[in-house]
Image (tube, rainbow, N blue to C red):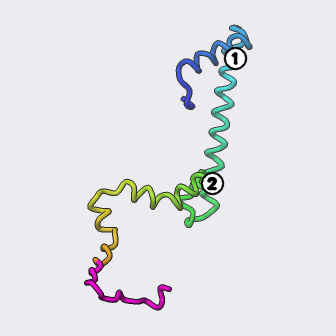
Amino acid sequence: MFGLGWAEILALVVIALLVFGPEKLPGVASQAGRTLRQIRQMANNARTDLEANLGPEFKNFDPTDLNPKNFVRKHLLDDVEKDWNATPEETAAADPPPPPVAVELTAGEIPPYDNEAT
């Protein structure tokens, strides 16, 4: 839950018990639950309103895509990850053919000269 282990959750419960006391703790926990539920409801309503008002072009719009980390991962790294996870057959099909093999020169033969390479 939220990336916390059992030891951290137990420590939070003990701290809450010491801060609020055993009499007030159930009331505080129920109020925190209601507040969390209201925040989730507001977030879901905002997402629904946003999707409804943006139109059909943004049907698959996800607000988390606006986070810079997610944006970079989606638009720049998807191709790289696809290449990393590709099977050898897919990689061989996508790779360009190897360059032609160079011909060895015999003794005294002048190598070809490329004017555009210099």
The image shows residue 1, relative to residue 90, as above or below, that is: above
| Residue 109, image x, y percentages | 30, 88
**Amino acid type for the residue under numbered disc 1:** Gly
Label 1, residues with CA under 10 Å away: few <14, some 14-19, many ≥20: few
For this rendering, which residue is in front, 57 or 114?
114
**Which residue does the image show at 64% across and 44% down from the upper left?**
43
The image shows residue 18, relative to residue 76, as above or below, that is: above
Secondary element at tag 1: helix
**Amino acid type for the residue under numbered disc 2:** Pro
**Which residue does the image show at 53% across and 23% down from the upper left?**
5
Callout 1 touching callout 2 (CB < 8 Å):
no
Start-end of magenta stretch: 102-118
Q: Which residue is mark 1?
A: 27
Q: Is residue 86 left or right of residue 61?
A: left
Instruction: State whether the magenta stretch is mostly helix, strand or loop.
Output: loop
For this rendering, which residue is in front, 87 or 22?
87
Q: Is residue 43 left or right of residue 78?
A: right
- Alpha carbon distance from label 1 to label 2: 39 Å
Q: Which residue is mark 2?
A: 68
Front of the two marks 1 and 2: 2
Residue 17 located within the stretch drawn in magenta: no
Q: How many marks?
A: 2
